[in-house]
Image (cartoon, helix red, strand yellow):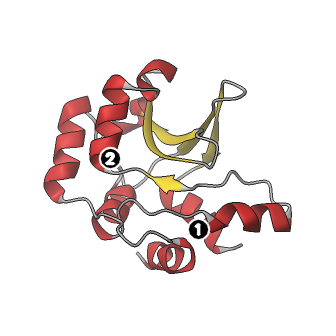
Amino acid sequence: MEIFKEFSSKYNRSEDAKKASESDIEKLEFEFNINLPNDYKNFLLNFGNLWTPDILDLIVDEELDLNDVQNFWKVEDIIFDKKNEWTSQITPNLMPIGSDCMGSIFGFLTSDLREKKESCAVYFFDHDLNTMEKISDSFSEWINKFNRI
């Protein structure tokens, strides 16, 4: 939890970030027959859809090999997009959780969400290159990469 507090205090610029409720999370899990990892649930419940535009400048200034995360999506946006919009067309195996400044997507593999877990790997779908790669072994580890900048 401290990792998420540090991240939020360093990078969140949203004045109206909406925390998810338990029922929001249950709806998402039921809708797609998945189990979100506990660390990500904790993030949603306590911090919600943060907006972190300053990360890009830090990555560019420091010349870091990281993809910037700019938006963490609200649960209702995840459900809507996964059913009706862009991520529904990318791959059925990606559950979106956020995006970078150019609209590429961060997410979990739905195949990793079949069982309850403390955490699972985070993937990045680059819409320009039409590629998907694993960028972190866990959600907490991924967030902590930004804390170390």
Q: Nearer the viewer, residue 56 or 21?
A: 56
Report which residue position mark 2 lands on.
36
* 96 to 94, vertically: above or below: below
Q: Which residue is mark 1?
A: 144
Q: Quadrant of residue 57?
A: bottom right
The part of the image, by quadrant, that contains residue 61 is bottom right
Question: Type of residue at label 2?
Answer: Leu
Residue 45 location in percent, x, y? 28, 64
Q: Residues within 10 Å of mark 1 (few under 14, many from 20)?
A: some
Q: Earlier in the sequence, mark 1 or mark 2?
A: 2
Left or right placement of residue 109 versus residue 118 in this view: right
Amino acid bearing label 1: Asn
In percent of the image, x 60 and y 38: which residue is there? 104
- In-front residue for pair 89/93: 89
Quadrant position of residue 123: top right
**31, above or below 139, in the image:** above
